[in-house]
Image: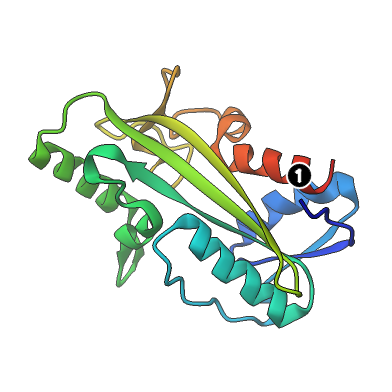
Amino acid sequence: MRKFSGDRLVIASHNAGKLREIAALLDPYGITVSSAADHGLAEPAETEDTFAGNARIKAHAAARGTGLPALSDDSGITVEALNGAPGVYTADWAETPEGRDFPMAMTRVWTLLEEKNAPAPRRAAFNCTLCLAWPDGHDELFEGRVNGQVVWPMRGAQGFGFDPIFLPDGETETFGEMDPIRKHEMSHRADAFAKFVKGCFD
């Protein structure tokens, strides 16, 4: 596995919250992070049907566009009884002309499960794939996952996205009810980041 040896890293995202989260994670390593937006890069079309494929598209586009190593993140929820949907289309399920409507998307998931008469527990997982790409075309992938089930009705207003209907295994609170610090310690993104730091920095 190739180690990260520079002191600058581009985050292949236009999401300011994601940039802050990653910058805090990398601060102990003396790395300066910037976003794809900071470099004036457009968001590339995500045309793959896997988290890894879309993470690679974003990371390589940013690495080519800046000449710097770039880190991307592609994530979403997969529901077993829906054959893994919404998966890479997690955010798309919430799209409306007025912006993203996640309560609508969560209702769609539950309605489809009811129509299929899916047995309980209705198994699901949050998945996150990180891709670190270099300008020479090399990349490393890190996959994180947290298993659980879909519950109804929606519970909690702490998280975002599909958090209010996701109950992690062994827990009594959904990601939407859970203290954000606790959620971040056990999330799919935390799992992937721990592998990323171990592989490329430690």
Residue 192 in sight in this render: yes
In percent of width and height, residue 47 lies at 42, 72
In the rendered structure, the answer to whether residue 179 lies left or right of residue 25 reads left
Residue at x 64%, y 81% (from the top left corner): 41
Above or below — where is 196 with respect to 45? above
In the rendered structure, the answer to whether residue 159 lies left or right of residue 100 reads right
Residue 14 in sight in this render: no
Q: Which residue is mark 1?
A: 199
In percent of width and height, residue 143 lies at 57, 45
Above or below — where is 71 with respect to 184? below
Above or below — where is 107 with respect to 6? above
Q: Quadrant of the C terminus?
A: top right
Residue at x 41%, y 17% (from the top left corner): 172
Q: Amino acid at mark 1?
A: Gly
Q: Residue furthest front?
A: 1
Q: For this rendering, which residue is in front, 82 or 92?
A: 82
In percent of width and height, residue 124 lies at 35, 35
Q: For this rendering, which residue is in front, 80 or 89?
A: 80
